[in-house]
Image: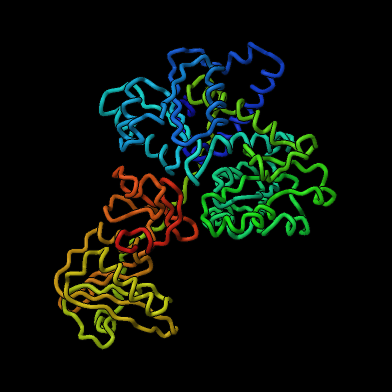
Amino acid sequence: MNVFKGKSLNVISDYSIDERRYFFRKVKELKDAIISSDEKKLDEFRINDPDFGIYEVFLENSTRTRESFRNAAKFHHAKVSELLTENSSINKGESFADTFNMLTGYENSIFIVRSTVEGLTKWLSEETKEYASRNGLKYAPSFINAGDGKHEHPTQELLDEFTFLEDNDMSFDSIHVALVGDLFHGRTVHSKADGLMLFDRVKVDLVAPDELAMPENYVEKMKENGFEVRSFKSIEEYIKSDDVANKWYFTRPQLERMGDKILQKAPLLRGAITFKKEFLPLIDPNTKFYHPLPRHKEFPTIPSFLDSTPFNAWERQAINGYYCRIVLISLISGKVGEDYVPKEREEEKSEKDYIVQVKPENTSKHSNYSEGVRPIKEGIVIDHIDKGENPAEIRKHMALVSSVLKLDDERGGEWISKGQDGRYKGIIFRPGYIDIDRKSLKRLAAVAPGSTLNIIQDGNVIYKYRTHMPPRIYNFDDLECKNENCISNAKNKEGIPSMFYKTKDGHFSCAYCSTFHSFKEIWKKGK
C-alpha cells in the first residue's frame, strides 16, 4: 500500500517526520539523477501520463511558486491547467465549494492552491471528498497548499528543510537556525514551528523587533515541540550573544500590511533585520543564509553584496524547490512511495475523560454552594467557575457560561465566593428542572473547564460532575474562530462549522488556521 497516493499537503504536519525523511531521501535521488542526466532513474519518478490533471489556482499572485510547480508538472508530462482568477466568478462572490467541486468533476487529480484565506485547502480537501462520494466519482482530488495568508507554506518548508539537510550533510541529528525578519506575517517561518521537528534537537533564535515578532501561538508550539527558543530584537543584539546560529533564515518585511504608524517607523524596523557589511567579521564564515525569495529590490534584508559570497545558500534553496515539487507530485500520484514502510504508530495515551462523574461528598452541605442565598431543593449549581480570577472577570465569564448553556431565561442567579485559599470563584444556581444532557456537559467543559456541576433533587445533590477541557470541540453553531482570514470565519460566508483542538498549554487551536484561542474566545456570544 502506498500511503502517499492521494494524500493532501495542507500543513507541514500532514506528513509525519518519518514520511518527510523518506521524502528527502527521494529528493536527493532525483537531484543527483538530474545533475548526472540519469534518464533511467528519472523515469522512476516521472508520471508520464497526459491525462493526469494538475490544476493551479492562484488566488494570490506568486510567479515563483506558480512557475516552480508548472515546471515540475511539465517534468511529469502531465496535463496542467490554470484558473484565471482575474476574470473568474470566484472573485464575484461564487463560493469556493462550488468552484472546486465543479473542477473536481473534470477529473483533476491535484489542485495547487494559493490564497489569502487561511485553512482553505484543508476545508476543500474535506468538501471535495464528500462531493466525489455523493456523485459517484472514482476518486477525490488531492490538495497542495501553496501558501494561505499568514498561516503556512508547507511546500516552501519542504524545500527549506531539504536545503538545511544538504548543509547538515543529510543528518537529522540537530539544527540551530536563526529566523530573521518579519516573523509576524511570514507563513514560511510559521511552518517551521512543526516543520523543524524533522530534526532530533532544535534550537531556534527569533530575531525581530516587537512589531514584527513571531505570533505567540507559534512560539508556544515550538516550545511544546521541544525546541529551545530565544528571542532578540535586532541582528545587532543577536550577534553580540553567545552561540550564534550557523544557519540564518531571512524573510521580507511586509510593512505595507501594518498601517501608517508602522510605516512611519519603517527605516528603524528594516534596519533591525537587515544584514550589514560591518557584521561580517562578527559571524562564522561557514554560516549559511537562506531566504524564500523574492527579496525587496530597494530594501533587501540580504543585500546584493552577499550574492557572490559563501554565505549564499538562498539561490540553491530556490532551485531545490523544483526538485522537491517534482517528488511531491510523484508521491501524490503514487508513482513513488511503494517501497516506503510506515513506522508503526505508537498508541496514543488515552486522555482522561473530560467529564467525570463523582460521588457527592456530603449531600447535606449543598446549601454552601449559594453562600447566603436560599438553598434550592431542585435544580443545578455550577461551582468553581473561573477560580482564581478577579471578581470582575468572573462576573463577565459567568454571563458567557449562562449564555452558552442557554440558562439566561431561567430563574436563579450568580454568586462570587472566596475560598479558604483566598481565591475567588463563580457560582451559578438555577432552581427547577433543567435538562443537562451529554451535549450540554460538553459545552460546560469547553466554556468553563475546571468547573463542577451539581444536580439537586429533593434538597440533595444526586449527581456531581467535574469538567476538564475537551480534546476537541465542534458541531456547535455558536462556535467561531476569531481570525477573520480563516475559511471558517463567518466573514468568508462559506458556512463552515468551526472546530477546535486542545493544545498542550490549554488553548483551543482552530482546526483550519491554527489560531490559538482561550476557552472564552471560541464562542460567538463571547466577543
Residue 171: image location, x then y, percent? 71, 37
| In the foreground, 148 or 198 | 148
157 shown above or below 366: above
Left or right: residue 376 compared with residue 247: left
| In the foreground, 500 or 80 | 80
Q: Is residue 378 visible?
A: yes
Q: Is residue 230 visible?
A: no
| Quadrant of res 419 | bottom left
Left or right: residue 516 compared with residue 246: left
Left or right: residue 314 compared with residue 60: right
Residue 284: image location, x then y, percent? 82, 47
Residue drawn at 41 percent across, 85 percent down = 420
Q: Residue furthest bottom?
A: 372
Residue 497: image location, x then y, percent? 31, 47
Residue drawn at 18 percent across, 80 percent down = 376
296 shown above or below 8: below
Q: Quadrant of the C terminus?
A: bottom left
| In the foreground, 357 or 229 | 229
35 shown above or below 440: above
Residue drawn at 45 percent across, 38 percent down = 115
| In the foreground, 2 or 283 | 283
Q: Residue furthest right?
A: 281
